[in-house]
Image (cartoon, rainbow, N blue to C red):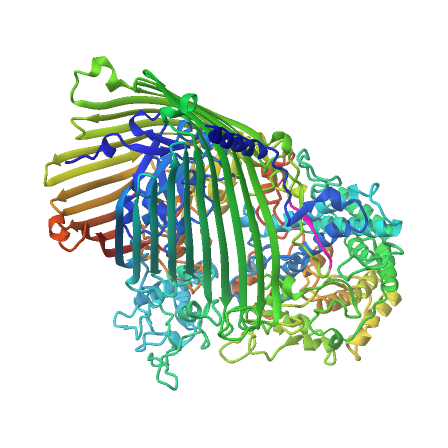
Amino acid sequence: MQLDSEMIDEVIVVAYGTSKKSSFTGSAQSIDGKKMELRPISSVTKGIEGQVTGVQVTSSSGQPGSSPDIRIRGFGSLNASNSPLYVVDGIPYDGALNAINPADIESMTILKDASAGALYGARGANGVVMITTKKGREGKAQVTYRSNVGWSSRAGHDYNNVDMKEFTQLLYEALRNGYVYDSGFTWLEAEAAARTSLKTKMGGERYNPFKAYTWDTIIDAATGEVRPDAVPAWDENWMKAVKRDNAFRHEHQLSVNGGSDRTKYLLSFGYLNEDGILQTTNFQRYNTRVNLESNVTDWFTANANVSLSHSISDYSNYSGTAYSNVWYTAQFINPMFPIYIKNLDGTNELDENGNPQLDYGEYGRPGSMTDFSILGGLLDDKSSYKSDGVSLRSGLIFGGDSDRLGIFKGLKLAINFGLDYTNTLDMSYMNMHHGNQAKQGGYIWKDNGRSQSYTFNQLLTWTRSFGSHNFNVLVGHEFYDYMYEYLAAAKSNLVDGILELRPGTTMQEADSYSSQYRINSFLSQFDYNFADKYYFKASLRQDASSRFYKDNNTGTFWSVGANWRISKEKFMQNLKWIDNLSMKASYGEQGNDELGSLYLWQSLYSLSYPNADNVGGVITSLETKDLTWEKNGNFNLGLEASLLNHRLSFNVEYYYRKTTDMLLSYPMATSTGFNGYNANVGNMSNTGVEAEMTVVPVSTKDFNWSVTLMGSTVKNKVLKLTKETPEIISGIYSIKEGNPINTFYMARSAGVDPSNGQQLYWAYEKDEEGNRIEGSDYITADRAKANASKYYLGCRIPDLYGSIATNLSFKGFDLSVMTTYSIGGKIYDGLYYSSMNVLYVNNVWNRNALRRWKQPGDITDIPRIELGGTAISNDRFLIDASYFAIKNITFGYTFPSKWLRKAGINALRLYTSMDNLALFTHLDGMNPQNNFSGSTSYNYTPNKTLSVGLEIKF
Amino acid sequence: MIKYSILCLVALFLLISCDGEKLELNPTSSMSGSSLMGSATTALVPLNGIYRSMYGDNNDETFGPMSFNFMNDCMAEDMVMGQGGSGWFEWDVLYRFKNYFTSTNERCYHLWSTHYSWIANTNYILAAQETMQGDTKDVNYVMGQAYAIRAYCYFMLAQNFARTLVGHENEPCVPIYTEPTTPETEGMPRSSNKEVYEQIDSDINKAIELLKGTTQQHPSHISYATALGLKARIALVENKWQDAKDAAHEAIDASGKRIIHTSDFYGVNDVNASNVLWGFKIKADQATMYHSFFVHLDTIQSYGTGTPKTINKILYSKMGPKDERRAWWNPGSKYNIRDDDGNVISGYINDKFHFANPKDWTGDYVLMRIEELYLMAAEAECRLGDEASAKSDLMALMSVRDPEFTCEKTGTALGITSNEETGSLLEEIITQRRIELWGEYGRLYDLKRLHQGFRRTYEQGWCVASYRLSNRPTDDPECYIWVFLIPQSEFDGNVNMTLENDQNPLGDY
């Protein structure tokens, strides 16, 4: 294998500079842009999963263009932000993540500890994702064109729901059980009553798909079962009706790159058009980037990097259990409900043109969905989001390393200016023909958001070597300013087909506001190494944030780190099989000020309360002048090695992160008019081990094979909350001193009572302080007792997670496979709960409900079927979160260059890629990466994409 | 070299010039309280803010006093829900809200937190009483309303989070705060019913004193007459009949309002109608759409039809054939629930409340109208034994409603449940109250203060079997089924209250 020099001693981009990976004192991992450019990913953060240790990633929504969330080394805060800081080309980035063209990325570096990130002290407490874009290269102009097309469908499985006959059976049993256990009927009376009431429950015979039987005869009275020979006259899956099969995606990239020894340039253009797997959803993006760098003299360099982006996103603007949210309605609808209006004989009722007509429920479809069709609603309502972004990174560097500069040699002053500007226009329209806004003649909402932020810094660096002593010193100042302006309006009673406010007659909303945020910082760093053997780094930074009161707005953050390259020691020189061995340790403190509001400390009256024609305001926050930065102490210990001529390399790190002065809403009695005020209270820790190993079993001229394994652990612990509240319970979650954040806290199932099919629970006695008395547990059917006897039942955080990847190349062929795994942790699947405890006739049961208790004496784990039952959250719906996913397989062929030269082509490569290919979980349908707290929601499901592409260089 | 040094100097200058940048920023969507409380003119801003948040929405079932009154209608026997639909207000009908006291998006929490938030807002205004600049009348106008709002809030809290005052004077009620909240404010323990009503009396009396001689500037503002009306409501709960009678009469005189025919306030959606003392004007751009009163009742809107709100048919039958209020319900509506033979098995659907304009979701919220004052006066007089005055006040209303109405009844006897009729004069006054104020006053508040239980029956229109609550003690006025639980969030932040000792009973007793 021809290991390129970069890989032997990889240079990585770190805070305010670059470093060699082997000698870096902190924890940083780099992702080569090449690993992303061939994958069909529309947002850069999708490329991070599986590529670095210590980083947890959600799956992100299936809406084209959406970005997953990222957590680096656990969870740093309860109420303040847990998201990393994004830095693009050295300057904190405020634009949209999906505005960056992944093809423009040279590399990404994840800074995980204080030594790496403390120079971004202000906002680096949750780690830093540094994105470096491509630059021009010296030499003849090179043109690269890349194009790929792909087809997407749902990743993973659908929930396994019952079919029409099974549904009829379960509905009948639910009604029968209601009569027996709620109304006190005898079993026989209840069976008869249930058979008769099917008709009203199901909206009459028009909604009876079994045309050979009527509702009151569909259940055989002798067996209590649906007639085996009943055949449905239709089967119209709502999800199928709204989905788009093989949603098309295509992407085209063109870049030109070149320059002289003085001036280098890069131009890049990109276009992406991606259809979602849900009809009507789409994402389109146009990108341009110009990157210019000129060495004017040996002591003056100027650079500018400008990127423009424009994107349009068509989406469905509904979430949760709104029935216009297809991910709720279509996924979990009663399977008997047709899409199209049926005649009494079960055939489609046609309109005058002979077309089937959408069923809006006008013939008495049961349930709560009035004047609603899933397909009609999706097609008639419209939402789109336009975003225009400009990012500028520019700098002037005075000074250089030339001997001519005398005592100024090695002294440089860099003045950098970075600007991110995003302008968004959001539109959402609810139609005038059906549904909630029909009476109002339709409703349209538009809002415009303008965000502009800039960072202006001046950095003075001094780099000199004296013999074996190497110095690199930095001092600087940085100023950050963020401004957001918002304008929104809405009207109703519109003109059909015009998606504008102008014709609307009735004003529904008109609003605007602006907000601002600033940070002023001084920073310094001292780097020293002796003979490339002993490395030492220290940094100090002071930030003042406008979020805090002026006397308490300053935070001081620092770090120290050292790296010992053991392999450079004399006693190691005989060990030829060791290419590199280094050990590193660091400690430092970083900060976090991101707790919701930009005006954290102030007591404010919100002015969004006008009373008819009178200005009105309501107090929304209490004054807290003492409030200041949340601090994050971060200890890191690492060992890195490369052995056997780079055939085996590994990197192991241990970390301990402790958050103190945690920004938290300090609980107050609700009766004071406030639930809390912002305060610095509480401590939390995250600790873990991260390991990465690469093996190269085969490395010959024609055949190369490498395997990379990654594994990470994270243990989170809440160390201290408040005196008044050592535990915060919210729903099924508990945050308690001594436990991990968001520990599941709910009733425990104790099986099913064979005599009546009731859900049984564990309960226990409590001591005077309200704590569980060990061993006092007993089984009860009493929900009140179960509700008062909740248990701590683990959390979402896995025991071990990581990736396994392999790369094979044989002559021109290459194959890479990337898989990810996660072991341990739990998920409370609320979607599954709802399809096991159906509330309304609208909804469907999961097939697991077929294991239900049917009659006295049955022994099973699923209680009797009820409609609108009274089950409480319990551990039957806590599912093992472990999963294994095949994230990507890419297969490519690079044509031999001698064939191409004649055609004037430098390189040609064809490839095919399968992204998000397969997912193996403990429950079909459940998305194990929905979020970090381990719940599920009615969200746009993730996609898998098959794509083919070509790359050509000339 | 010189060029280089100059450039360096320029750059260093740039570096230094940035230092003085301002880090003290203020938002544009909010402003600080201290500047608002300076004068009686600007103090109207926080006052109007409270009123606005009284018709702003928290969720589908929480939109201030209108939703809490409607909830107390849904919990009793006269507001018959024909079927469940999407389930809005169904947990009130079914008394399921106690199960969700830990949630911050459910009934117990909203009922508690909204009232305490209004109280906190009034406490900031009241704390500025001594320092506020402006004409005495203008300051009194602000302070009087703040006292009245505080009285109103404690009155609503007391009625929902404790059993009724009379007979339970020493039972725990709710915590009292009269000082502005700061981060140092500690949660207070529950005061007794007696203490809370003393605070309510003191506040409403101060309000009346301060508001006397001021002019109502907006229908949403609590005027002198409105404050008297509130006092009459409070006095009825306290069984202070003379106070109730005096306050109601004084309110009638001071209000300048008059009883009008139902056709003159069609839809009960106009605060400018001649009979309205207090109400919220709903403008199109301030309307809360689905999270609003009329959505749940109006038969033009789909939700009011799919989940019909109907009147107890027994109550409906009490109206004389010429009673103009018969038009408030529609026995012939296709939205009534019927059996297979076409007979209406639910109650009769609402035709009383309508959007003013369903196209823009507008329709004002009426919180007090003069008809109620006459009914309160009549009730108090009946209790005082002055049946002649009681009948005269009752007839003042009934002569407008029903030309054939006469009343020869006497006495104050009431059944243990509302189903057991006694034929007394007091019962007649209450019956007319039930009809006149259906859907706008919270029937359950009356049942509680009257120490009456109820039974929902099929004959009344309760066709959904589970809504009849046949195995729950709604017939026992002493039970706790309707005493709300204090939300979990209170215990999470209150050092002076524990779940074990200070929570209301989780069950029906």
Task: Assign the N terminus of chain A to one quadrant of the image.
Answer: top left
Label total for image? 0
Residue B389 visible in the snapshot: yes
- Above/below status of B101 relative to A224: above
Q: Which residue is painted at 48% across and 67% down in the image? A: A368
- Above/below status of B208 relative to A226: above
Dominant secondary structure of the magenta stretch?
A: loop
Image coordinates of residue A552 in percent, x first then y, are 61, 30
Image coordinates of residue B273 in percent, x first then y, are 77, 70
As drawn, which residue projects farthest toward the top?
A571
Work out whether residue B221 or residue A724 is closer to the camera in this orientation and state it.
B221
Work out whether residue B286 or residue A734 is closer to the camera in this orientation and state it.
B286
As drawn, which residue projects farthest toward the bottom?
A352
Quarter holding residue A70: top left
Q: Is residue A928 magenta?
A: no
Residue A83 visible in the snapshot: no
Asked if residue B471 lies left or right of residue B496, the reply is left
Work out whether residue A327 or residue B10 is closer to the camera in this orientation and state it.
B10
Work out whether residue B137 or residue A93 is closer to the camera in this orientation and state it.
A93
- Above/below status of A558 relative to B223: above
- Above/below status of A776 relative to A214: above
Image coordinates of residue B59 in percent, x first then y, are 57, 56
Asked if residue A69 lies left or right of residue B354, the reply is left
Q: Which residue is painted at 42% across and 69% down in the image? A: A379
Asked if residue A605 lies left or right of residue A592, the reply is right
Image coordinates of residue A717 in percent, x first then y, are 44, 31
Q: Which residues are magenta?
A: A614-620
